[in-house]
């Protein structure tokens, strides 16, 4: 088995259907499997997979495990040489999975590869970034981000000086669409389950660099990411905002 595609789903039936349709419209040319972990969505997602995609390995969790535990559960049931983690809001427009796979095959030093992602309007999304200092998430989610010094910090973090038109090594890549080498996971471990929803991708990339591997941003892909940045848009009194902040504190305590 060459590629195990892991999709962690929670109450996103429509996006899950679109994501799975894209995979099977542009399937990898090598042996692959698709594993969907459903976090007790109760929105018809399970029935959708069973009826329309019977070839998918479906894992039904009893509770909402979160991003990292859910993906880890899928990885534990996978067999592939490479693990391809996908959010349900990813849509494939060409054979990008094959392209990423071939890149990994030709770059044995690569632990993780994240492709260029586009917004629905076709603009390039910020999906590769520099490691942030401890206040950047606060700047991005509060009025402090409008201050000149904070704007400079955010711009550096988002790599606005990079035109995103070349494949290159980067500090970290967005975990919405990321291919990981299994032999690297055997050394650095699975996603950090101390973190519920956020910063597991940064932790994975940091541990990969520390283990002597590289992290790449890969541009030769045609993929749409329907990204909402819910933690920034929900307001300071929302649950998702505070999940983000708590995960950030836990991440920095553990990895800084």
Image: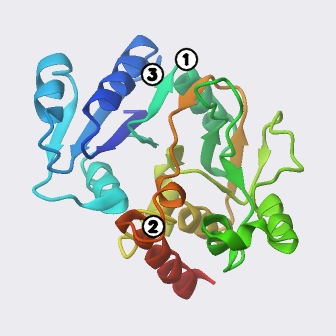
> Cβ–Cβ below 8 Å for labels 1 and 2?
no
Q: Is residue 53 left or right of residue 26?
A: left
Give the mark, 2 or 3, whose residue is nearer the N terminus: 3
Nearer the viewer's eye, disc 3 or disc 1?
A: 1
Give the mark, 3 or 1, whose residue is nearer the N terminus: 3
Question: Which residue matches tag 3?
Answer: 30
Q: Is residue 25 left or right of residue 9?
A: right
- Note whether 1 is above or below 160 in the view shown: above
Q: Which mark is residue 95?
A: 1
Give the mark, 1 or 2, whose residue is nearer the N terminus: 1
Q: State which quarter of the image contains the C terminus.
A: bottom right
Q: Nearer the viewer, residue 73 or 151?
A: 151
Determine whether the residue tagged by mark 1 lies in a helix, strand or loop.
Answer: loop
Determine the residue positioned at 20% across, 22% down: 55
Q: Nearer the viewer, residue 60 or 57?
A: 60
Q: Quadrant of residue 138?
A: bottom right
Q: Where is residue 61? Give x, y as percent.
A: 14, 53
Q: Quadrant of residue 221?
A: top right
Q: State which quarter of the image contains the N terminus.
A: top left
Determine whether the residue tagged by mark 2 lies in a helix, strand or loop.
Answer: helix
Question: Which residue matches tag 2?
Answer: 241
Q: CA distance from mark 1 to mark 2?
A: 35 Å
Q: Where is residue 158? Give x, y as percent.
A: 75, 55
- Note whether 180 is above or below 240 in the view shown: above
> Cβ–Cβ below 8 Å for labels 3 and 1?
no
Q: Residues within 10 Å of mark 1 (few under 14, many from 20)?
A: some
Let me know if residue 109 appears in the view: no
């Amino acid at each position: 088995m060459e590629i195990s595609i892991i999709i962690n789903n929670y109450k996103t039936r429509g996006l899950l259907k679109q994501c799975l349709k894209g995979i099977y419209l542009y399937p990898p040319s090598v042996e692959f499997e698709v594993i969907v972990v459903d976090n007790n969505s109760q929105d018809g997602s399970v029935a959708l997979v069973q009826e329309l995609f019977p070839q998918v390995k479906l894992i039904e969790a009893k509770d909402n495990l979160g991003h990292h535990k859910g993906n880890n559960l899928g990885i534990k049931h996978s067999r592939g040489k490479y693990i391809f983690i996908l959010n349900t809001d990813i849509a494939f427009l060409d054979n990008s999975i094959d392209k990423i796979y071939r890149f990994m095959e030709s770059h044995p030093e690569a632990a993780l590869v994240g492709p260029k992602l586009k917004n629905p309007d076709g603009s390039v999304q910020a999906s590769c970034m520099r490691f942030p200092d401890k206040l950047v998430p606060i700047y991005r989610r509060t009025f402090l981000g409008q201050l000149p010094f904070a704007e400079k910090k955010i711009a550096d973090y988002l790599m606005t000086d990079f035109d995103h038109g070349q494949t290159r090594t980067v500090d970290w890549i967005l975990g919405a669409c990321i291919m990981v080498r299994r032999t690297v996971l055997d050394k650095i471990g699975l996603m950090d389950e101390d973190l519920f929803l956020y910063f597991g991708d940064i932790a994975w990339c940091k541990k990969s660099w520390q283990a002597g591997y590289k992290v790449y941003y890969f541009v030769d892909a045609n993929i749409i990411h329907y990204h909402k940045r819910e933690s920034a848009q929900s307001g300071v009194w929302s649950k998702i905002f505070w999940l983000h902040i708590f995960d950030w504190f836990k991440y920095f305590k553990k990895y800084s």
